[in-house]
Image (cartoon, rainbow, N blue to C red):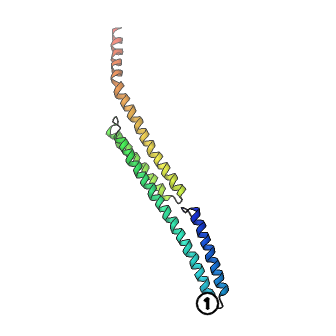
Amino acid sequence: LQGVDQSVKDQAKAEIQKALEAGNIAIDNSTTIPEVNKALNDAQNAIDNIYNGIDKTSKDNINNAKDKAKQDIDNKVDSANKEIDNLQNLTQAQKDKAKEDIKNAADKAKENIDNANTLENINKAEGTGEQSITDVVNQAKDQDTKNKAEKEYAPGEKSMNELTKSSSKEI
């Protein structure tokens, strides 16, 4: 069972062993077939209840981990979108594209989280999704820096071109 601590598993195994021993004692002490059948059914029900309890815990832990991972992805999206909004040298189209890429990365991460069946795979899907979002933000920051440089150096470049043109006319 996934998503259950080893200590809980060990406790469940001990409880199953006790239920099995109690069932064997009840069967040994039975004197009729109906008493044996009842003891057997009681022992089986006790074991099933223990297993069902730990199975529910497992499923609850997996579902809780999925919910938390998806919430973490949503928080990462909010943070990333704020970072994108604060990049002053990006055009609105570049910001919109980055936010769309962030949303797509988040959607893919949530899909992978939903498809994961172990805590390890949930954590892996969350980490991969968060890294994809970070990559989009880093690309947007690079574009922001490039846009800023183009704005700052474009006038100088234009002046240099004009100087070159006028210099070649004089020759």
For image coordinates 65% across by 78% down, the residue present is 21
Q: Give 116 or 19, whichever is nearer the viewer.
A: 19
Q: Is 121 situated left or right of 159 in this image? A: right
Q: Nearer the viewer, residue 68 or 153?
A: 68
Residue 34, given in percent of the width and then of the height, sits at 61, 90
Vertical comparison of 74 with 157: above or below: below
Above or below for 164 versus 144: above
Q: Residues within 10 Å of mark 1 (few under 14, many from 20)?
A: few
Left of 85 or right of it: where is 69?
Answer: right
Label 1 SS: helix
Q: Quadrant of the N terminus?
A: bottom right
Residue extending farthest to the top is: 171
- Disc 1 target residue: 34
Q: Horizontal and vertical percent for residue 72?
A: 43, 52
Q: Name which residue lies at 33% across and 40% down.
A: 93
Give, as a three-letter code, the residue at label 1. Pro
**The C terminus: image quadrant:** top left
Hey, which quadrant is residue 94 in on the image? top left
Q: Position of residue 108 (x, y in %)?
A: 45, 52
135 w.r.t. 3: above or below: above
Viewer-closest of 44 and 156: 44
Horizontally, residue 31 falls left or right of residue 157, namely right
Identify the residue at horizontal 34%, vertical 28% (top origin): 151
